[in-house]
Image (cartoon, rainbow, N blue to C red):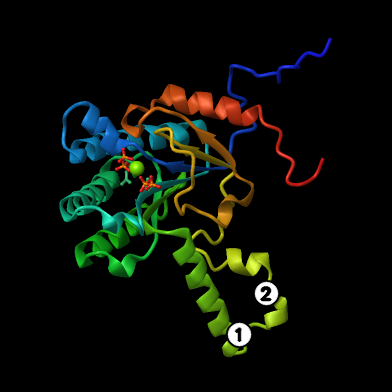
Amino acid sequence: MFTFKKNKTNNVIDYTRLPTHIGVIMDGNGRWAKKRGLPRSAGHSAGADTLKKIVTECNKMGIKYITVYAFSTENWKRPKEEVDYLMNLLMSYLKDSERTLSGENVVIKAIGIREELSDELQEQIKKTEKFTQNNTGIIMNIALNYGAREEIVRAAKEIAREAAEKKIDINDINADTISSHLYTKNQPDPDFIIRTSGEERLSNFLLWQAAYSELWFCDKLWPDFTIKDLHRSIIDFQARGRRFGGV
Ligand code: IPE
Ligand code: IPE
Ligand code: MG
């Protein structure tokens, strides 16, 4: 008789095989608030608290990189009131991180189109990056006004410029050339991407870098996501067979 052989799944994390770079699409803040009869802003604020817990845990576990999707290039379509709230929240998150996450040795970087952000926020980003640059713990990329298509277009323009200036030969352009012109240059691609809230799409997040990422979805809304959920996701990641096109 034909029977399915269940993959052997351990219930403990193998700390020698952690993902190197985790991407997180923190989705569901608005629905979390709605369920409680609260304004969407309350969901964003609760989501920021969850983020601190998760980054702290990833750092403790020894994960080297985390990229979190905080605001997409498409999120400007939201009502002005919500966008303003998110920008203020990001500002206080960055300020606060200098005390909290920096004390935990986290390196904070922002990726995305900075020039479109307010002068104050741009200043704060610079300050927080400088403040944490010599830390030696997890590298946290905050994707803020980030869109993968914009990132790739920007890379293409830079490469074209370098070719026009004869700094590079067109025949030498390869996948590494593209990678080294992205916001995430010098960082490994994410091997694992988590998205909460039941949506199963990338929504313009790290499209180039996610070519071989393992994707993991859960129904929980981001403010409800716990350290236990993170552990569960990593155990699932470790049970997957990654083949990169091989056998
Ligand atoms: C994710 O939660 C946070 C941001 C996009 C800034 P949402 O605000 O998208 O929450 P839902 O998807 O509407 O529930
Ligand atoms: C993706 O979530 C962006 C962030 C989490 C910041 P969205 O809620 O904006 O994505 P869609 O609209 O559901 O695809
Ligand atoms: Mg959403």
* Residue holding disc 2: 173
Q: Secondary structure at mark 2?
A: loop
Q: Determine crowd level at label 1: few under 14, some 14-19, many 20+ residues with C-alpha closer than 10 A.
A: some
Q: Is residue 180 visible?
A: yes
Q: Determine crowd level at label 2: few under 14, some 14-19, many 20+ residues with C-alpha closer than 10 A.
A: few
- Disc 1: residue Cβ within 8 A of ligand 2's nearest atom: no
Check contact, mark 1 vs mark 2: CB within 8 A: yes
Q: Residue at x 36, y 65 (%)?
A: 113
Q: Residue at x 48, y 63 (%)?
A: 149
Image x and y of residue 118, in percent: 22, 65
Amino acid identity at mark 2: Ile
Image x and y of residue 144, in percent: 35, 55
* Residue holding disc 1: 163
Q: Is residue 15 visible?
A: no
Q: How many circles with numbers are drawn on the protein?
A: 2
Q: Quadrant of the N terminus?
A: top right
Quadrant for residue 20, please give it: top right
Question: Foreground: 110 or 6?
Answer: 6
